[in-house]
Image: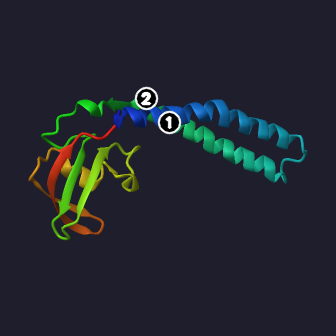
Amino acid sequence: MVERIPMTKNGYEKLRLELTNLQRHERPAVIEAIERAREHGDLKENAEYHAAKERQGHIEGRIMELKDKLSRAEVIDCSELDCDRVVFGVVVRVVDLDTDEEIAYQLLGPEEASVEGGSISVLSPLGRAMIGKSVGDEITVKTPGGVRHFEVLDITLPAE
């Protein structure tokens, strides 16, 4: 069974644009660089050739990875979510019961999540613990830094 990858429309579009750029611009440019390097003769000691071949390998690997992720993407429209419970795509505001610090995260797929950007993966320990919770529910989650306790303060739709 194929494992689906949840993502927003924006996340899907970013991956699709990256794939298009790699296929239409980066791939032809590196092929041209390899051809130029070949013209310099002996390939064994040609650093330019080896660097271009290595870059080509990275580009081809990323293209394969993006094609796989896009083929397994399950695009979820976050504009029509129910905010009664925590689900993929919503913004959850919680309070850390140990420090009284309030934090807000949007729950996204692993491809889109960025703690610095205010989002976490639904597959992270905290993300998994939040799923299905309602305002007022307490969450206990085991993290690499130890057990943490949170309370759900608010569940909202993301700002577009």
| Disc number for residue 71 | 2
Residue 103, visible in the rendered structure: yes
- Hey, what amino acid is under mark 2? Ser
**As displayed, is residue 9 above or below residue 148?**
above
Q: CA distance from mark 2 to mark 1?
A: 8 Å
* Image quadrant where residue 11 sits: top left
x 15%, y 66%: residue: 97
Q: Nearer the viewer, residue 25 or 46?
A: 25
Residue in front for this viewpoint, 36 or 14:
14
Residue 76, image x and y in percent? 31, 31
Residue 62: percent from left, percent from top:
56, 40
Q: Give the mark nearest the N terminus, 2 or 1.
A: 1
User: Residue placed at 15% from the left, 53% from the top?
Assistant: 152
Q: Is residue 60 above or below residue 153?
A: above
Instruction: Please give the residue where the numbered disc 1 appears in the rendered image.
Output: 66
Name the quadrant containing residue 159.
top left
- Residues under numbered marks 2 and 1 in contact, where contact means CB atoms less than 8 Å apart: no
The residue lying at 18 percent from left, 45 percent from top is: 155
* Crowd band around label 1 with a 10 angstrom C-alpha radius: few (<14), some (14–19), many (20+): some
Horizontal and vertical percent position of residue 128: 23, 49
Three-letter amino acid code of the residue under disc 1:
Leu
**Residue that extends furthest to the left in the rendered view of this protein:** 136
